[in-house]
Image (cartoon, rainbow, N blue to C red):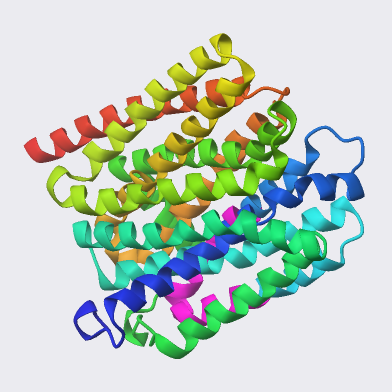
């Protein structure tokens, strides 16, 4: 199957891919309003340990990501998607039944491993059918639709909590997974022909890792993605605490989060319009430079404005962090995948795994460092953006050397 004989419309294909990607956002963001209730029930008196409910899921997703791509190269895209959905649904049920924080964290860890299937295999499917700036354009539209889920997820999570408890959110996870996997199972044919499949072995996975890490542009893209993911996970893990403990606006949190997520979704639409003319690297560099500037302004706001004005400044800064994701992740993925079409599944797995695991390693101490103010969060994200900007300047030199070679 190619993009020219795709049996569904491109609109449906984008929506389908967006729903697969949205498994991740829904699994993370719907939990945010539940964190205080879970902490009160399962870990009373703890200090910020509820943020580990987010981090454990993301860590499991990163670990699972190592294997889902190579397995999809061996067995096909759809069998791996379906298997991941089964694991995800089973672990959601275990989370629903959990009576201790340890059991809940274990369920979330393995639930994240199951969610790695939709994340990685969907990216591989897009690479199976598209390449270069066409791929970046498709990914931009996917990300634009995908952003609607994190916008609605906290509101849906709060609605479920109001009418049941935090355990009801895990029922929603099971239903969401079943609907999405049935959609792709029925509507999308297997995109990877049998003759193009690659045997699975750890030796080949490690060989693929070495090949990818040996390409400077790919290596740099993974490092920049890791910094961006660390910033995003750090913000997501801390933002509910900021609204609740710093600004006493916990009841308003789902609505602010929804509005900010919807507004930031326009970044992917903007990227789709600009990337064909301006190029991927330039847009990523500008977006990261803007994060440095916005973090600097936010630090000043936190030291000069009153609490009321600080809150509005924080909400605006939160928007800029989310907005930058739409101008960076899709482009970085497309840049790194361009020379790796012969090993798309493995490449998607390795990139996703490394950027996610490194991102969690970066984000966990950021979330745990919350001291009642957003200052540690803002300064950390600004510092990460500065490192990312320097790496993008390094990537420009890599491209210049490749042109003159």
Residue 251 at what x, y percent from top left? 71, 44
Q: Which residue: 68% across, 64% down?
A: 111
- Which image quarter is the C terminus in? top left
Viewer-nearest residue: 24 or 359: 24
> Which residue is more in the foreground, 37 or 89?
37
Asked whether, in this view, residue 211 is left or right of residue 110, the answer is: left
Q: Residue 47: image x %, image y %?
A: 83, 32
Q: How many marks?
A: 0
Is 111 a magenta residue?
A: no
81 in the magenta segment: yes
| Region in magenta | 60-86
Q: Nearer the viewer, residue 80 or 288?
A: 288
* Res 201 visible: no
Looking at the image, residue 225 sits to the left or right of residue 285; the answer is right
Q: Residue at x 91, y 50 (%)?
A: 41
Name the quadrant of the N terminus: bottom left
Give the side of residue 354 with respect to residue 213, left or right.
right
**405 in relation to 21, above or below:** above
Q: In terms of depth relative to the viewer, which is nearer, 153 or 234?
A: 153
The part of the image, by quadrant, that contains residue 304 is top right
Dividing the picture into quarters, in which one does residue 296 lie? Answer: top left
Residue drawn at (41%, 44%) of the image: 325
Main SS, magenta region, reads helix
Percent position (x, y) of residue 133? 20, 57
Q: Residue furthest top?
A: 304
Instruction: Please indicate, yes or no, whether residue 187 appears anywhere in the rendered image.
Output: yes
* Rendered position, 1 above or below 198: below
């Amino acid at each position: 199957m190619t993009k020219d004989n795709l049996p569904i419309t491109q609109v449906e294909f984008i929506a389908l891919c967006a729903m697969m990607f949205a498994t991740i956002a829904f699994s993370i963001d719907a939990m945010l309003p539940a964190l205080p209730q879970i902490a009160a029930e399962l870990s009373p008196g703890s200090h910020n340990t509820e943020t580990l409910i987010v981090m454990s899921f993301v860590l499991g997703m990163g670990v699972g990501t190592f294997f889902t791509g190579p397995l999809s190269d061996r067995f096909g895209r759809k069998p791996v998607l379906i298997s991941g959905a089964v694991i995800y649904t089973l672990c959601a049920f275990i989370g629903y039944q959990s009576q201790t924080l340890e059991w809940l964290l274990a369920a979330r860890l393995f639930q994240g491993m199951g969610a790695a299937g939709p994340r990685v295999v969907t990216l591989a499917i897009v690479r199976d059918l598209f390449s270069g700036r066409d791929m970046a354009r498709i990914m931009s539209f996917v990300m634009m639709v995908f952003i609607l889920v994190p916008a609605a997820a906290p509101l849906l999570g709060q609605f479920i909590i109001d009418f049941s408890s935090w355990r009801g959110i895990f029922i929603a996870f099971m239903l969401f997974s079943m609907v999405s996997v049935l959609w792709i199972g029925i509507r999308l044919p297997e995109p990877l022909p049998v003759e193009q499949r690659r045997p699975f072995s750890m030796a080949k996975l490690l060989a693929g890792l070495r090949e990818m890490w040996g390409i400077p542009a790919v290596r740099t893209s993974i490092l920049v993605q890791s910094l961006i993911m660390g910033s995003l996970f750090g913000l997501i893990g801390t933002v509910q605490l900021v609204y609740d403990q710093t600004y006493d606006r916990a009841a308003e949190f789902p609505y602010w989060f929804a509005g900010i997520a919807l507004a930031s979704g326009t970044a992917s639409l903007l990227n789709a319009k600009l990337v064909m003319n301006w190029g991927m690297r330039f847009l990523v560099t500008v977006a990261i430079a803007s994060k440095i500037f916005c973090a600097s302004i936010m630090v000043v706001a936190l030291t000069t404005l009153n609490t009321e004005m600080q809150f509005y400044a924080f909400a605006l800064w939160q928007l800029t962090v989310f907005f930058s994701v739409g101008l960076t992740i899709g482009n970085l993925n497309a840049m790194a995948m361009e020379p790796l079409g012969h090993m798309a599944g493995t490449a998607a797995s390795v990139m996703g795994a490394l950027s996610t695991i490194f991102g969690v390693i970066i984000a966990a101490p950021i979330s745990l460092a919350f001291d009642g103010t957003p200052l540690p969060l803002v300064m950390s994200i600004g510092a990460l953006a500065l490192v990312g900007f320097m790496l993008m300047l390094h990537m420009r030199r890599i491209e210049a050397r490749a042109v003159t070679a």
